[in-house]
Structures are given as structure tokens and as C-alpha cells.
Image (tube, helix red, strand yellow):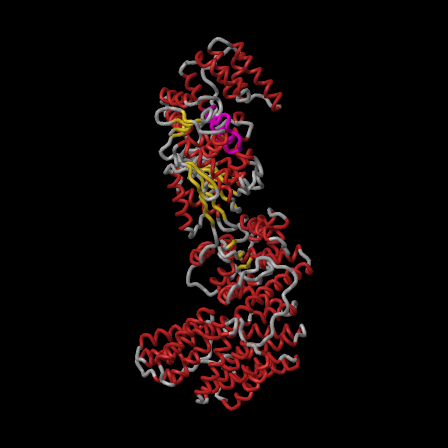
Amino acid sequence: MRFEVLGPLRAVDASGSVMPVGRRQHEVLLACLLAADGRTVADDILLEALWGRDPGDRKHGSLRVLVHHLRRALGTESIARTTGGYRISLDGHELDADDFVALAETAARYEAQGRLAEARERYRAALGLWRGTDAYEGSADTDHVRAAAHHLGEQRLSVHESCADIELGLGLHRELCAELSALCREYALRERLQAQLMLALVRSDRRAEALAVYERTRRMLADELGADPGRWLQQLHTAILRGATPTAAPAAVVAVQPAQLPAPPSIFVGRDDELASLDAVLATSRSGARGAGAVLVTGSGGMGKTALVTQWADRNRQHFPDGQLYLDLDDDLPAAVALARALVDLGVAPDDVPRHTESRVARLRSLLSTRTVLLVLDNVSSAGQARPFFPGSGDSLLVIISRNRLDGLIAREDAHLLVLGALPEEPATSLLWAIAGLSGPTTGDIPALMELCHGMPLAIRIVGTRLRLGARPGVLVAALRDERTRLARLATSDGDVSVRAVIALSYRRLAAAERRLLRRLGLMDGPTIGFGAAAALAGIPAPDTLTDLVDALASANLVTVAPDDRIGLHQLTRMFARQQCQLEDSAADRAVAQRRALDWYGHVSGRAQHRIGPTTSRGDGGAVPGEPHLFVPELTDAATALRWADAEADTIVRLINQHGETHHDLVWPLVVNIRGWLQRRAPRDTWISVAKQGIRAAVLARSITGEATLYGSLGVAHSLLLQRSEARAAYQRASALFAEDGDHAGMADVEASLGAMLADSGALDEALEPLLRARELAAPLDDPDLIFKVELNLGYLHRRADRQQEALEAYTTALSAAERSDNRDWLSSSVHTNLGRVHFLRGDLDQAGHHYDTAVRLSRSAGDRMQEAWALHGCSDVAAARRDLPAAVAALHEAITILEPLGDRRLDEMRGLLSELLSGSSATSLSENASPAPLP
């Protein structure tokens, strides 16, 4: 199949017969696909081309039908569905436009080599492929088809001009007069054609006509553009007036080899992967692959984009024998101006630079198609600035450097993408040492300086320069530790180079709403923030609005968006945003934003707490706020709730520590609502610290419920660390507060915890009284969670007192209560652990193993790492009793691994037992000392 677009669109089969494409819509569809040059054409573009703007949702089906009909009419499956659109593959097919370009490129090479006869033959063959004056004639109804047609038309004119130069040199001026006259009437403002016609006429003894061509051109330029003819045309006119007969047309292009790249940095460290990526792009561009001639190097300010490109370009100069162009498009230099500079730098006389942007684009592509040039565009702010510079064909390579992501260049032009992030620790340290001129052993201050630079090459270079100029590392560390002044100090003494200025440049280019969101994000201390919290901080009421704003910030490389939809800021960008918030927003506005964030976290953590549901104290974080919240995660069970809490824990703890006194009325409910996560996941010292902060906030807010609930939580944490006096005091304070508030459920809960702690410490007689009191308070409430806790702890007490039957009865009651609970798996896992111990002490290893295995499975389902560890401890007991030492060692080792980050109470004892197992000692010591905890 051959597709012909150099004139009216048509398809020709192998026999040369023209095949009917179909109706008008089929022709438009085929034109759109062919004009895309092998790239995907989005559905929206096709729909608009076929049915105009706002075609309606139903037209998607009609588009599929048209594609089906077109495939059937052409007898080809080359039209493929891709993500978001369609593309046509020309593998196995021909396109006359490709043949035209190939012939033109071959002719240009022959011309450059002085093989003029062969060049003329190829130029004429290329022109002979045209069946009309316009490509896609009658089908250019969309922007990208018109652009493709215009580009081909410009190439056609360039071929005419190049061919005419050769034929004039060969003395074929008489034969050219008619052809050039027709072209000049159609393209009256194209001065090179006018000059060629004047030369052909004067050499054919038609001097008056040549002068008339000049006068006609002069008037038209003056009337339409307010300009005079170019220098070459004027010189030719003057020569004709003087009676001379010029022997050649004015040269439009004088071949030059520009070498404009800035010098690479004298010190360049790391970025090996990025340099290899650029090497791969170069190799791909030389393979002839479509869309391979451009690469976008992007990243936030200060990440060393220009340094990387200049370093790579300097290493690869030999691959670009026709020169290297460098254009700095800072201050949003218009593409038309930049194009003119590029053309002049490539040898086009200033007077011969086309006046229209599209003509400049076509001229540049024509020049690049016959040369091997590296074209570097720096500080590109938009896709529109860079798009005109994309090579159409040939071996030239375009490298775009931008702070912005410029997704459009990737989507439409298939540009390769290279994103620069922070330097890893090792190359960052090497860069600092090289810049500073350091030698000798590393001091402790150097790693601290690296940490304070956060991997930003610009910051590292500034710090290295300060060290080279005599600054002492320790003094510099002390100066940079203060986040309020770090950005100000990350600048050279003359202010010429500044991290703050680099970030500010990107900030100033944002829209007002985008700047406001960035400032709000700066109020958060954590490394990332979820969409919901971001919406709350900025007071954004609509999901689409937030998504658009975040996309804009990500496009400017001021934030990153992880696959789990968490927004991240580089630490120096966060400091900048926070400082701008201090400068631009009032204290009241900042306080409102902080309260919105706390409110959002309180709302979602309350939902998570309901799923995680510890049985410690009954208090909750207050009523659900009336204000609607965006991006609230679906927490369908304990596992999803724990995953959410794991991801947000660092941020929540920072918020609690930061706002415990300023927004105490929102902080204490937040602490109450993360008790479940604290008990199941948090290191014990974190748990105690957060609980104390929550108690202080509850006292300031005068909330007895909050204070009592958090004293109960504090008691649990101390109990698990065997800090019994602290636990007793916390439980007793909680019980007194619940009594003052008339909360019998709360009283029962902490009394059960107190009894469990006493039983665990060996005070068995003293433990019975609070546990019986808890049973009495819980009975009329019929709360399965509360009944479970009381009975489980009574069972533990009976077992410790060697009342095994009473223990079994209590555990059975606890298991029945667990079956009625929303937290069945979590509660049941604790009962099964204890039942496993009872059966183990009775010598029934099969029953013990069954209960322990069940406990492991249920605790994993519930996400309770601590309970899982104690169940594994029991599995180790059973394996040891069976003399299966490898299984005993494996289970106990896994239990220790789980408990180590939690700081649990009997880690030393368990490590000792593991050592005994590994040494081959009797396993009975493990059985005698191990004991699962009651439920605190």
C-alpha cells in the first residue's frame, strides 16, 4: 500500500490502482493519522477534526466505527488502538512524503559534496512527486494536519530554490524563467525566489522584466510588511541597474560551524547514570528512530541541569561536526526571536531570515536535516518555546533544559525525559570535598554539612566555596542548622549565587493559587503530605481544583507526587515555602490553615481508630466535624486503617508536638484517635511522649474525658515496658477522672488494665480486686470489647495462680465476646495465644500448637505486630518441646525481630532464650520462662 499526500490524499495499491478511502470523514481521519508521522493522535483531536468542538460522548463509538470502516476499506490492520488514541504504522507501506524528504536530503548531501548533476537529478525527482501545490490538499482541516502540510510546502519551496541555484549555475536560466515566474507570483514575499527569477531574466536578456520583478517585490514588502527588500535583493538590483550581468544568485546560507556551548564545570562529580542516559539518547537518534532527536532534561532549580548537559556535550563534540548551538531562553524569550538567532548562527544572512515564525521553523528544519548539529535550549519555560526547534529529520540532536516538566513535549513530540533529583550521599560528599579543596581524614562536621545541603548540587557548591575561602566546618554547621536562616546563608557573599533566588525564580512564575498552595504545604514538617491534608491546609473545596494545582506545582518541579498520591517537597523548597508563608500570609490565615489540617487528621484518624479499635478506655476524639473533607481514604478494615496510619504517623506526631499548646482543643482528640496505632505499631518511647503531649493538651482544653482516656493509654505503655509504678499511677489517675466524669465503661477498662499489670508483676492477690471491680462495672454495659478484656485478664490471673480450669472458663468467655466484636481477629488472636499457653502447660502440645498457629494467623490479619511476636514465641515453645530446634530458633528469631523496634519488655529474656536454643541447651528453660502478656 502506498499513501500519497503531496497533493490530494489518496491510497494506491500494489498494482498502481487508486483505492477508494471512503466518505469525507474517512479521508479526514486518514489525513490526521498520516500527518502525525507515526505518533499517536489523541481521541479528542480526532473527534474535533471529525465533528467540531464538543462533539459529545456518543461520538467515541462513532469514531471506533470509522476506524473499523477505514481498516476494511484499505485492507490493512496498520491502524492500531493505543492509550488515549490511534496511530498508523507505515511498516510495510510507503508514503510519498517520506520519499520526497529522502530524495531532498540526498540531493543536499550531493550538493554539499559538489556533485551538482546528481544533486539536480534528485531535486527534480523530489519535485516530480508532487501532484499539486499543497500537501494534504482538501484535507487540511485540523491544526496538526495544516502544520504538516505547511512544513512539507516549505520543504518543497526550499527544494525549488536549491535546484534553481544549481540550474542557474549550469546555465539553464532560459528554461527556469517560466517556472520561477509562476512560483514568484504565488510566493511574492519570498525574496530568494525573486532574486533567482531576476537573475534568470537578466541572463536571458530580459533586463527590464528583472527590474520590474524587483519593483513589484519592493512595493509588496512596503505595503504588507512596511519593510524594504533584503540586502541580497538590493545588491542584485543595483548590479542590474549598472548594466552588469551577475553570474550567480546570492547565497542564502553560508555554512558555519558554531561552537557556542558554555564551558563545562571544572569540577563535575557523579551523575554517571544520567550521562549514560544521554549517551543512549544519542545512540537512538542515530538509529533513525522517529521522535528520537530530542531530550528534555528537567528538575528543580539548583540540581545541576546545565552542568550535566555541558559536561556531556563537551565529551561528545566529535559527534556533532557541524557545530553546537546554545540558546538561553530566559525571561521567556519568544520563539520567533530565538529562531531568528538560530538561523543566523547557522549561516543564514539576517536579511534572508523569513519574517513569519512558521517559515523560520521550516527553514531551520531544512538546515538541520542536512547537518549534524547539537542544539541546546536552556531555561525553557514552556513547551511552545521549544517545540519549533525540534528537528524534522537527520542526525541533529535537540537538548532542552527546563525547570518545568513540559509534559506536552513528551506526549506530542516523543521527547526523551531525564529528570535530575538530589545527588546521592557519596557523589555529593565527593563534590563538596573537590569544591572545598579538602584533603585528609573526614571530620564529623562534613556529613552534617552534607545533610544540611539536602543533596542539592548548588547548595553543595556554595558550601564548598565557603570552606575554600576559609570558613570553619563546625561554625558553618552551626550557622546552617537554624532553618529560619539556612536559605539566607546558602548564598555566596556577593549574592551572585543563591539557593533562595533559584527557588524564588520558579515561585514567581506560578499563578497566585499555585503559590498559595505551595506556601500552605510549607507549614507541614513531614517529608510528604497526602492530598486530603493538602486540600485542608489550603482550604480547597473541590478535588479537581486541588489536582490541577498540584499538577502545576509538579510540572514546575516544586513538588513530587508519589504513586500513592503523596505530595513531597525538597527540604530547601519547604523552607522557602514556609518563609514565604510568614511573609505573605497573616498569622490568622496560618492558624486557620493549621486548624484545618488538624481537623482533617482528627476526622480520618477517628475513622482509623474505629477500625483498629484498641480496648483501652472508651473515650474517642470527639464528634465528626460538620465541614466536609476531601480525599478521605476508604478504611474498610483494620489492615487498611493501619496502613494509612503507618504512612501518616510521622506527620501526625509532628503535628501533635508542634501544636499541642496552640491548638490544644484539636490535638488531644488526635492523640486519642491514634491510640490503636500507638499500641500496635509505635516504639514505646514514642507512645509515652505522644500520650503525655495529649494529656497536656486535654488539660489546657479542660477535657476530663480526654485526660482520663490518655492517662489510660499512658498506663498501657508503661505496663508494656514493665514500668509498674508509673503504670499504677497512670491507671489510678485515669480511674479517678472517669469516676469524676461518671464514665463506668472507662473505669472498667482501666481497672482491668490495672489488674492485668498487677498480675503480670506477680501481685496476684492484689490484682484480683480491680479485676472483679472491672467485671462488675462491665456486666450491665454488655460491651463485647470490654467484657473480652476483663475476662481475658482474669484468665491470665487464674493461670498465673495455677487455677487452670478457672483460666479456661474465663478464656472461653473472652473468646465468645470476641466473636461479637467488630475487632474479632485482633481480640481472638490474644485469646488463642493464652489458650495455647494453658494447653502447653498441661502438656497437650497438639492443642497448644493449634492455638498458637491460629493466633499468628489472626494477628497478621489484624496487623498487630506485638501480638504476632508473642504468638510466635509460643510456636517456638512448642517446637522446642518437640525437639524441633530449627523451627524453634526460626520462630523465636522472628518474634525478636518484630519486637526490637517496638522496645518491648522482655527482649533481653527472649534473646537469652534464643542463645540457649542456638547452643543446644534444654528447651525447658524456654517453656518455663515464657509467658504471654494480658491485655493492658
Residue drawn where x is 40% and y is 16% of the image: 170
Q: Where is residue 736 shown, x and y percent of the image? A: 63, 83
What is the magenta segment's predominant secondary structure?
Answer: helix
> Quick one: 629 or 717, which is closer to the camera?
629
Q: Quadrant of the N terminus?
A: top left
Taking 84 as reference, is 181 above or below it?
above
Residue drawn where x is 50% and y is 84% of the image: 794
Q: Is residue 914 visible?
A: yes
- Verify whether residue 141 appears in magenta: yes
Q: Where is residue 504 shown, x and y percent of the image? A: 59, 50
Q: Is residue 494 visible?
A: no
Q: Quadrant of residue 628?
A: bottom right
- Verify whether residue 205 appears in magenta: no
What is the magenta range?
135-158
Q: Where is residue 916 shown, x and y percent of the image? A: 34, 81
Taking 422 as reference, is 229 above or below it?
above
Taking 65 as reference, is 167 above or below it?
above
Q: Quadrant of residue 701?
A: bottom right
- In the image, farthest residue toward the bottom: 765
